[in-house]
Amino acid sequence: MECMEGRQIRWVHVSKKRMIFEMWRHTMKMEKAFVYSVKNVLEKSMFKEGFEQIKHTYRDLNYTD
């Protein structure tokens, strides 16, 4: 059993189709993670910008009063 598990982990005796599929799957996981990280960064910056605009509007209203 250990021998079979070791072959699977070290990619010994894997068909070309299987290797292509595994690499494609790995690449898609990396792309998905990248897209989610970019989304999180943009979301945080948009929230920050929105809160700054609210703060400036509040400050302007206080000055005009």
Image (cartoon, helix red, strand yellow):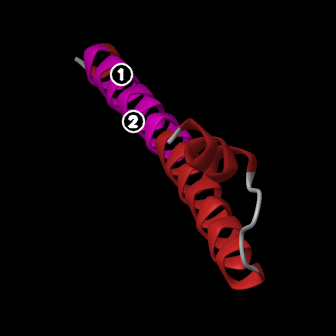
Question: Is 45 in front, or is 23?
Answer: 23
Are there few (<14), some (14-19), or many (20+) residues within 10 Å of tag 2?
few
Q: Amino acid at mark 1?
A: Lys
User: Which label belongs to residue 47?
Assistant: 2
**Chief secondary structure of the magenta span?**
helix
Compared to residue 52, the image places residue 37 above or below, namely: below
Question: Is 54 in front, or is 26?
Answer: 26
Q: Position of residue 20 (x, y in %)?
A: 73, 77
Cα–Cα gap, marks 2 and 1: 12 Å
Compared to residue 1, the image places residue 48 above or below, namely: above
Q: Which residue is mark 1?
A: 55
Compared to residue 54, the image places residue 34 above or below, namely: below
Dot 2 lies on which element?
A: helix
In the picture, measured across the screen, residue 16 lies left or right of residue 60, that is: right
Give the quarter of the image for residue 62: top left
Q: Position of residue 54 (x, y in %)?
A: 32, 30
Residue depicted at x 50% and y 42%: 1
In the picture, measured across the screen, residue 1 lies left or right of residue 47, that is: right
Region in magenta = 41-62
